[in-house]
Image (cartoon, grey):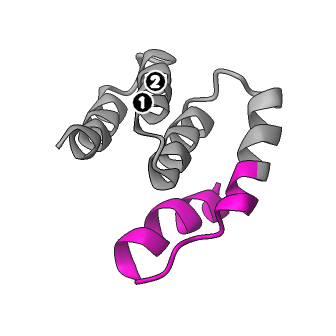
Amino acid sequence: MVLLGYHLIVMFVLSHQEGDLSLCEKIISEQLKLYPNGVWFLFFKARLEFMKGNLNSSIDWYIKSFKSQDVWPQFHHFCFWELLWINW
């Protein structure tokens, strides 16, 4: 999860380089097989699609992500923030 956060968020926010999207795709696909409703893996899948430019797919994954849990309302806000950038 640290690698996903680094390559999908930190690299795009704090540097002028892109993260290793192929590594992220490999990690996420393996983890989603094990944890198909894992909130963080769904979120990172949405972020990956966003970084690849697949905005409609990204929106679907963000919605799946925040609907997969209701324990952390703050996490919903995190997803809504990302959706704001897609729709802006």
Report if residue 14 lies within the magenta region. Answer: yes
Closer to the camera in the image, 70 or 68: 68
Closer to the camera in the image, 20 or 31: 20
Q: Is residue 41 left or right of residue 11?
A: right
Query: Residue at coordinates 37% horizontally, 79% vertically from top-left?
Result: 14
Query: Residue at coordinates 40% horizontally, 29% vertically from top-left?
Result: 59
Residue 10 in the image, given as x and y percentages of width and height = 45, 70
Tell me the quadrant of the picture where the C terminus can be found: top left
Q: Is residue 58 above or below residue 10?
A: above
Residue 25 in the image, given as x and y percentages of width and height = 71, 50
Query: Residue at coordinates 31% horizontally, 26% vertically from top-left?
Result: 73
**Label 2: which secondary element:** helix
According to the picture, the residue beneath numbered tag 1 turns out to be 56
When asked about the image quadrant of residue 41, the answer is top right
According to the picture, the residue beneath numbered tag 2 turns out to be 60
Q: Amino acid at mark 2?
A: Asp
- The disc placed on residue 31 is none
Q: Are marks 2 and 1 in contact (CB under 8 Å)?
A: yes
Tell me the quadrant of the picture where the N terminus can be found: bottom right
Residue 55 in the image, given as x and y percentages of width and height = 41, 38
Query: Residue at coordinates 32% horizontally, 29% vertically from top-left?
Result: 76
Q: Amino acid at mark 1?
A: Asn
| Magenta-highlighted residues | 1-25
**Label 1: which secondary element:** helix
